[in-house]
Amino acid sequence: MTTPESKLNVPPASLAGSSADDTVSGDIKIPDPARLVRTMSDVAGRAQRLVNDWLMRQAKEGIPLDPLNVGGAFLEMTAKLMANPSQLVQAQLGYWQDYLTLWQNTTRRILGLETAPVIESDPRDKRFADAAWKQNEIFDFIKQSYLLSARYINDIVSKVDGLAPKTSQKIDFYSRQFVNALSPSNFLFTNPEVLRKTAESGGENLVRGLNNLLSDLEQGRGKLRIKMTDIEAFKIGENIAVSEGKVVYQNDLIQLIQYSPTTETVVARPLVIFPPWINKYYILDLRPKNSLVRYAVAQGHTVFMVSWVNPDERLAEKDFDDYMVDGVFGALNAIEKATGQREVNAIGYCLGGTLLAASLAYMKRKGDERIKTATFLVTLTEFTDAGELGVFIDEEQLSNLEERMQRRGYLEGGEMAASFNMLRANDLIWSFVVNNYLLGNEPFPFDLLYWNSDATRMPPRMHSFYLRNMYQNNLLAKPGGLSMKGVPINLGDIEIPVYFLSCREDHIAPWKSTYRGSQLFGGKVRFVLAASGHIAGVVNSPDGGKYNHFINDSLPDDPDAWFEEATEVAGSWWPDWQRWVTGFDKTLVPARIPGKGKLKVIEAAPGSYVTVRA
């Protein structure tokens, strides 16, 4: 019979460079005592300073005990459960029956008998990828116990009758956060990989992990700001955001980059891209092999990119109207001067697409027809079902957020990043807790995670307008419900051709919601659904050979009906968009060189606005 200890499969630690005093028995390494004392002394001093700073800031900022307004939702759920306890009793009986079966199966395994698992983990769940979770009876028992408990909690919270939809969504979301946090993979003594590493290194991984934890707390000034990648491995303009171009215009909110052509002739209509200002633009120019900017330039487009400022308290009064006037109209005016061409094609990504839609409706009311086609990438214009971001949008949370923004003069970029990370907590939070703090590893250099950690701030007036009018009240979807510069707007007035690109696994802009939003427009709409999520589904070069997409020329009311009739196409959606956008005007003109028109070069791309870190 194989013992649990033998299945841990702990390899001997390497003795290279170690003295006899540093190791015993050749397989367990003992760290140098003097070095350990110095390290722990340093850790104690840093921890004390962090606690003092954190306590002072909590008192100064008046942060409430329940800033996410979770307590009330769970109290309401508890009251509903107590009013009808039969569901709770039934769930408990099923849980204990499964747990008893698990005990029996584990006993049989220890005796050397084969047994089927009571519950299986998802094959895609990386938390339990280590072989010991299956091969070792004890860790298999721990894993299955956790999975049964997780299922039990989910069964309870998902079957409570009488809760408002928003309350039910909040309970479900935060219950999963709780369950994810309690995964045995997140703790030293219940993670076989961490135990193995601890034995190999004599605990040095834990000391390194503690140092990593304190460094992240220091970086966040007492708030845990998990380091997801090697920040020093990347530099904007050197190994990311490297497409050649020049900044040809700037104002308080934007720098406008004109990219250098790579073809002798170009499409007559320039292409302008409005990225979200929640993140920085260079996700669309991350690396040469997956740069949408580089692809569009190679296809003969004169590409202009809006690079939003990273605002501080000096721009606290900037509102959504300012982002339209200084962002959209500022770019359009500059492009006409730079190229002599009044008509353009426009792309809006996420929040940049929401702004583009509102601006187009305003322009229609004003008789401004400069934008001839519009492309919306994973863009919400109908916010009835905004996905799990909706759990952060209720009156209590918004009021608290507005108070904090007014006090500072901006919304901290890290606060918003933390909310987005919670949507994929196992991948974007707990995997790094294990890697950085338990295994003691340094994070791997990864350009996408560098971009993800390059947070931006938000002006209070603009952000409050966006959250209340879009997410909370869904006014953009209602004819005349929203006004821009005092003018009521209606998305149904927009009659130019539009292209909607959504992604099946998007947790920020759910595809069925973006589909419903596409039906609000008055002109011809092409809706395309890509595989993967909010970023990977968009940044999907044809050269990568990844992720399919679905097309359907019809646009039925029901998104499920659209999908059932859709045709699956292998590879990237980029060529489909290229055929679509050039199909309206194939006129070619000589390539345009940045700085050769009426606008002179201010500085080389990627410009200075994008390099400002929050």
Image: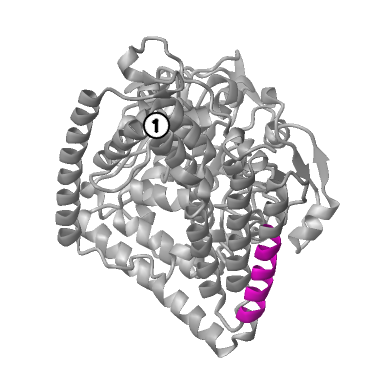
Residue 597 on the magenta segment? no
The quarter in which the C terminus is drawn is top left
What is the magenta segment's predominant secondary structure? Answer: helix
Residue pictured at 50% horizontal, 27% vertical:
286
As drawn, which residue projects farthest toward the top?
17
Q: Which quadrant would residue 258 be assigned to in this image?
A: top left
Q: Quadrant of residue 104?
A: bottom right
- Residue 463 in view: yes
Q: Nearer the viewer, residue 572 or 366?
A: 572
Residue on which disc 1 sits: 440
Amino acid type at image mark 1: Gly
Q: Nearer the viewer, residue 115 or 526?
A: 115
The N terminus: image quadrant: top right
Q: For label 1, count other residues whose C-alpha is less than 10 Å away and answer few (under 14), some (14-19) or many (20+).
A: many
95 within the magenta span: yes
**Picture residue at 59% right of the left edge, 84% below the top:** 162
Q: Is residue 254 left or right of residue 245?
A: left
Who's the residue at 69% across and 36% down the image? 577
User: For the magenta stretch, what is the residue range?
Assistant: 88-102
Residue 182 image point, x, y percent: 48, 55
Query: Where's residue 19, x and y in %?
Result: 33, 12
Q: Is residue 329 above or below residue 546?
A: below
Q: Residue at the location (51% across, 19% down)? A: 592
Pinpoint residue 219: horizontal percent, then vertical percent: 26, 38
**On the rendered structure, is 291 left or right of 329?**
right
Residue 600 is situated, as x and y percent measured from the top left of the image, at 35, 22
